[in-house]
Amino acid sequence: MDTQSVQTENPLVEGLELRRRPEPCVLTIFGASGDLTRRKIFPALYALAVRELLPEHFAVLGVARTEQSSEEFVAQMEAGVREFARDEFNADTWAELARRTRYISTEFADEEGEDRVAKTLTELDEELGTRGNRVYYFAVPPDAMPKLAEELGERRTTTGWTRLIVEKPFGQDLESARELNDLLSRDFTEDEVFRIDHYLGKDTVQNLLALRFANGIFEPIWSRQFIDHVQITVAESLGIERRAAFYEQAGAIRDVFQNHLLQLVALTAMEPPIDFTAEAVRNEKLKVLKAMPTPSPRAVVRGQYGPGFIEGEPVPGYREEDGVARDSGTDTFVAARLQVDNWRWADTPFFVRVGKRLPRRETTLAIQFKRVPHTLFEDTTELRPNLLIVHIQPNEGVSLAIGAKVPGEGMKVRTVHMDFLYGGAFRSGLPEAYERLILDAMLGDATLFTRADEIEEQWALVDAIVAAWRRDKPAFPNYAAGTWGPQAAQELVQWHR
Amino acid sequence: MASIAHVDEWADECASVSEVEQALINLRLQRGFVGKRNLRTTVLTHIAWVPREWQQAATETLARLAERHPSRTILLFPEPDADDGIAARALLECYEAPFTDRHLCSEIAELRLRGSRAQAPASIVLPLLLPDLPVFLRWRGRPEFASPVFEQLVEVVDRLVVDSSEWEDVPGAYRELTEVFDRVAVSDIAWRRTLPWRRALARAWPDLPDRLTGPPAETALLAGWLRARAGAEVEIERADQLPVGDDREPSDLLSEELDVFARDAVYEEAVRSAGPL
């Protein structure tokens, strides 16, 4: 009997807030020895365990090339949980999760490796009652994904259900993304594939939907009639850390622009979905992505940071980072003027920028409204247009800039801010995105995951931009670390004004 | 939990309500120009009616609550035997907001309602309510349900929060409680305390016990719940502790009640079935 039917028949459950727990399953993490597992996945699993949201019958199987025993893997994960989990460490909760965790060091692509994984999964089913249900987490580099998907498809059994969580980047361009989608669709249906964009798991990104669709006052003015333009910023003050090999291939445009940024544009610009189900939400996002024409080369600015200062500390330029070519042409900054060509947004620019080594870490969405059509007051020099700012991170919240009269004689008007600070009104602590996403995948809810056609539209736009870039060699570096990117990016917005 | 950053205070042994309101504004404005940027973050107005015997317990609970549940809190201490007047204290409590450069500030007004002022509390709190935010009334101890004071306050609030484990005459008192259900939404901290026990019973369903062992209010409510929801009759045995307990602080339990806005039909049904048949 499934959970839902038990709940409808049981007269005692009403009002008990019994949260739906996923069905029994094994979560198999490929690439388990990587940082992601220690910093994000296990702390998220621990947070779910603390809240009793993991399946009653549950196991974790880590798979990676690194030679180590299950005990060593568990000890590493414990250290990760102690360092990165948002809850206090509880030995009993951890012991229960650790008891259910195994590790296999293998090259999954070889026959013997596949056999060992399959054998261990069967043993876990027998030992822990996980009933053949599988969640496979692809925390592996993009080039390892096709082979992994192929092998899993070939070995798929008819017992239980199977779901795949696929980490970004999903492909390196449209062609590779299509190939991977085609490969996945051979053995798995679309509702079995969960492409992660962890931004969608953030409460504050979901709050954007609440702001738009749970408030009557914003949606009527959420259009070209009242909005002058939209600015979206995804800024990091960090450099590339130890990701030079990946970043040299990807650059800012594939690392952040192709996924997080375009998803934020889609959520901001989409029409109200008919309900909050995966298909309805993703259908509306897709329409926005399809309505975005390739920006002209003049509407895109790329940059690469040179040496500079972050919070007073000197930092090296991109080309001086370990593992980066001294003449690298990789972009660490992208700004663009995007358009959404539909009735709601025609001629309303979406100014977007992503970058590394910018002055501060900040993800914001700023909606700038049109000025009043006629000024009544004598002194409005300090009055700026109304601005609605959604702070996605940090200082999660919403600010609205409005004009107010300066006390005293006359009618001098200036801009003041009304602030809503997320953590001020809701003191329970924001969950990590991975908690929500892993739980949703186990429950089979794909609302906060990216569909194949969305990914392909995103890549089509990025491929077109990159194709234009190939025509000339950029004069990099063109911005100093600790600044807001190249001057040309500022000018994109200024031209509009 | 974030630590308290500063508390600013104003007091007057003989104050008017408008002076209290002005004092709260002044505290906020003064603090607004000093040090870190302060935010008044308010999600509700929280009134507490606190007879003398409950003052210490109420103060301890509220001290923990303010940081967790940003609100304007109005503490009403009735002192009907004193000379007429209102002795007031206004406080602005500010806390470090984690990961930001701001302080979050909550307002507290402590009002000692002396003499005849204790007979007209609604007229005192009405000017202090924040517009358009829900108003919760925490009534410490057993309410005198038909009294003018209770009637007045129930009329101006959206939700009444009681803890029926503070009452000595349960389940008999539940009959009076049912009479306010159609006028104001009611929360009972005793009911909240039984949540883990109810979850355990729901998971065990249809295998229900014949006997419930625990404190009077909680067991009476659970017996009423089982009678109403599952048609099950159980015996009750007195004990000091709940078998499946919720060992959180009273402020945590109250904090959860302050997140509930709608009427709780399941609770009302349990109360109606908890009284003597």
Image (cartoon, rainbow, N blue to C red):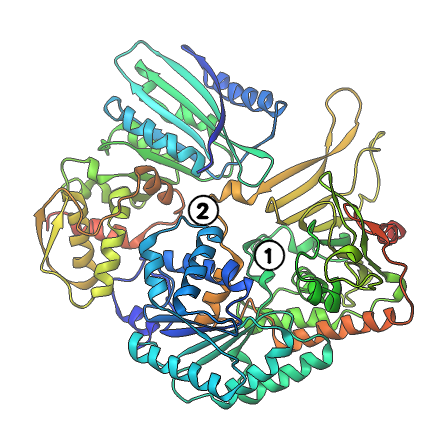
Task: Measure the C-alpha gap from mark 2 to mark 1.
Answer: 17 Å
Tell me: B77 left or right of B132: left
Point out residue A224 in the picture as x, y percentages from the top left corner: 77, 57
- State whether discs 2 and 1 lie on one chain: yes
Give me the chain letter of mark 1. Answer: A
Residue found at x 34% / y 37%: B251
Few, some or many residues within 10 Å of mark 1 (<14, 14–19, 20+)? many
Give me the chain letter of mark 2. Answer: A
Q: Any mark on residue B220, and which?
A: none
Mark sitting earlier along the chain (2/1):
1
Res A407 quadrant in image: top right
Point out residue A423 in the picture as x, y percentages from the top left corner: 52, 43
Point out residue A66 in the picture as x, y percentages from the top left corner: 51, 71
Q: Amino acid at mark 1?
A: Val
Residue on which the image places disc 2: A428
Res A141 quadrant in image: bottom right
Residue found at x 35% / y 22%: B120
Tell me: A132 left or right of B18: left
